[in-house]
Image (cartoon, rainbow, N blue to C red):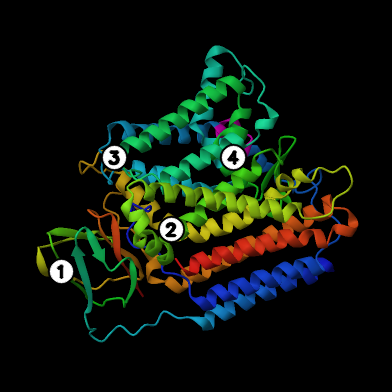
Amino acid sequence: MISAHGIGGARDLPISPELAIAGAVAALTVSFTVLAVAWRKPRYDEATSGRPAPGWLTGIVDARWWSVLWRVVGFLLFLYTAMVAVFGKDLLTNPLFGIFYVWWWVALVPLSLLFGRVWRAISPVRTINLLFARLSGGDPDTGLYRYPERLGHWPAAVGLYAFVWLELIYPHNSDLGPVRLWAAVYVALMLVGGVLFGNVFYERADPFEVYSSLVAKLSVWGRRDGALLLRSPLANLDTVPPRPGLGAVTSVLFGSTAFDSFKDSAHWLRFFQGSDFINEHGWAPNVVNNLALLGFCLAVGAIFSLGTVLTGVEPGFRRRSLPTLFAHSIVPIIVGYIIAHYLSYLLEAGEATLIKMSDPFSDGSNWFGTANWKVDYYFAYHPTLLADLKVLSVVLGHVVGVIAAHDRAIKLLPRRHQLTGQLPLLFAMVAFTIGGLWLLFSA
Amino acid sequence: MRKLRYFTAVIAVLVGVLTLTACGSDDSAASSSPQDTKTIDVKFEGGKVTPNGERVDVAVGQPVEFLVTADAPGEIHVHSDPEQQLEYEKGTTILKLDGFKTAGIIEVESHALEKTIVQLEVR
């Protein structure tokens, strides 16, 4: 089997059973506490929430040089990545793999959590689209056609699935050719989309921008009518636009991360390697892996959808719109679990990538002076701290998710269903959180 | 008032978790005394390998050896950092590894068979 973390050494130890149970008990207690004592009138309102950021901060962030600065930074990173993709060697010492799998996919989450819509600010495809528009005298915001509303975030969900498929399923995922091809197809599709639909395409269909901007809703940074706001993450989360396909995006993100944990577990490994059927049919491992990844994503989507629709609604209210209207509330659960899943990997493989970047062509050079650094395996020496942080992150994500769902429920549901209508979703969330803890425990 | 009560509850729970975990576990495995070598039997036969991905507990610093019986020569990969590749002959070979310095799960694989032989749970 190909180790998905093909660029790392040892993996994290499983969390202890005591810790997993403590986390599960905390999640359960918090859930019902929220239901019992939390507010009965909606608190979060996009039109009024948050307060204006201090003037000096707005001055910097809205200045032209600020946005140009981050476009330049993003574009330099893009040029460097293209350079190692084209001229670098097909070796694991090529920094492309770390940039692709660790910085792009994993580091984007904490960066967006801290600084807001990071990918939107540095996205090289947005920059190229902007330059195209400048050169041709057009407007980067508009394309040849209007972006179809019904498409929503569906293209982004497909793009995210294509990424996790490459990362978790494709056997040659640490060869240069396939990674380069994936990235080239991504850039090409994004440029075509930009020409057709303008910048709105990136906002709705670029898998990385959708992912980054969704996580950014848990940051303190918001905007209303263009003005920079400071908002509590809960109020900010409430402003996620409920577009079609949002639930598909969250299902792919959560399902794939859960599958990533699951496929390394001893249970799955013994089943997978020990099954005569899989061993005797050459095609079987690939098919079984594909079905398992798809199954995880579909199961997350199904459990969540079921949790949201099992409630009474006002006459005339379209029940089928509920999963999308509640989809924002699962974002904190996803982010909490992703941080738990990737924390040590991000620090270790992220630093290893920085070291490899200094030698882009694997010829022993030291461009940035980082080539002689040694990776700091801090968490390998502090496994208890790591395990505590993981469980804390999962439980915190659960708390925020449950509160977000509660506020949305009292906004949407008729009065007599407000309490009972929340229960199925609460059970779904508890199931996700306990499932996540179980995966960390059996890792 | 509601808000206050509610946040108190949340904080109480989180503090509860932390205290639980604080007494529930600790890092202090006594690893100062010289440790016995952990021996793992590995058998390659007709394109198959046993064990089949079992977990093996190893202490930090404990030396590990593989007692390999094989019907053809080959090599096993130890996905520690740095990675180690150990070659074995037809017949019986003893492959020795120094103790691992840090905790974690380390995969031991046969790349030729695309199989994980054991996962070393180092703690």
Query: Residue at image x 37%, y 50%?
Result: A285
State the residue lying farthest toward the bottom.
B33
Q: CA distance from mark 4 to mark 3?
A: 30 Å
Residue beneath disc 3: A360
Q: Which is nearer the eye, A48 or A24? A: A24
Q: Amino acid at mark 4?
A: Val
Question: What span is colored magenta in the figure?
Answer: A61-67
The kind of secondary structure element at disc 2 is: helix
Residue beneath disc 2: A263
| Pointer 4 local density, CA inside 10 Å: few below 14, some 14–19, many at least 20 | many
Q: In the visual, does A423 lie left or right of A212? A: right
Look at the image and tell me in which quarter the N terminus of chain A lies: bottom left
Q: Amino acid at mark 3?
A: Pro
Depicted A293 relative to depicted A418: above or below: above
The kind of secondary structure element at disc 3 is: loop
Q: In the visual, does B73 lie left or right of A81? A: left
Residue beneath disc 1: B69
